[in-house]
Image (cartoon, grey):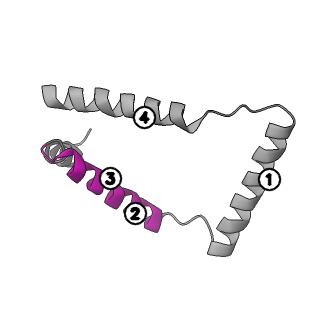
Amino acid sequence: MNQRVKSILDEVRKLTPDEQTEFMKQIWAVIDDEAPDGTPAEIEAAWDDEVARRIAARERGELTTVGSDEVIAKAQAIITVARARQSKT
C-alpha cells in the first residue's frame, strides 16, 4: 500500500462509524462518476437483461434465494466484527 493511501486510511479510522459511512458513500460516488459503463439507456437495458436472466435461472431452479432477515443479520454481524476490530486499533 502506498503512503498516500495509508495516510488516508489512518484518517478514516479516526472517523466515527457514521462519518465512515458517509466517506464510503462519497468514495463510491467518485468511482461511479469516473467509470461510466455506457449511456443511461444502455445501463438500463443491461439491468433489464440481468433481471430477466436471474428470473429465468430462478424459475429453472438454478438459483436459490436468501430471506432479507438472514441478509440483514449477516450484514449486522459483519459490521459488529469490523467495529470491534476498529476499536482495538
- Report the residue at 79% width, 53% height from top: 52
Q: Distance between the residues labelled 1 and 4?
A: 27 Å
Q: How far apart are marks 4 and 3 (CA)?
A: 16 Å
Q: Is residue 84 left or right of residue 36?
A: left
Circle 2 residue = 29
Query: Which badge, 4 or 3, is on the more N-terminal residue?
Result: 3
Residue type indicated by callout 3 = Met
The C terminus sits in image quarter = top left
Q: Distance between the residues labelled 2 and 3?
A: 9 Å
> Closest to the observer: 43 or 5?
43
Residue segment shown in magenta: 14-34
**Residue 88 appears in which quarter of the rendering?**
top left
- Report the residue at 17% width, 41% height from top: 13
Give the numbered dot on residue 52: 1
Q: Is residue 28 left or right of residue 59?
A: left
Circle 3 residue = 24
Give the numbered dot on residue 8: none
- Residue 25 x/y as whole percent: 35, 57
- Report the residue at 19% width, 42% height from top: 6
The N terminus sits in image quarter = top left
Q: Which of marks 3 and 1 is in front?
A: 1
Query: Which badge, 2 or 3, is on the more N-terminal residue?
Result: 3
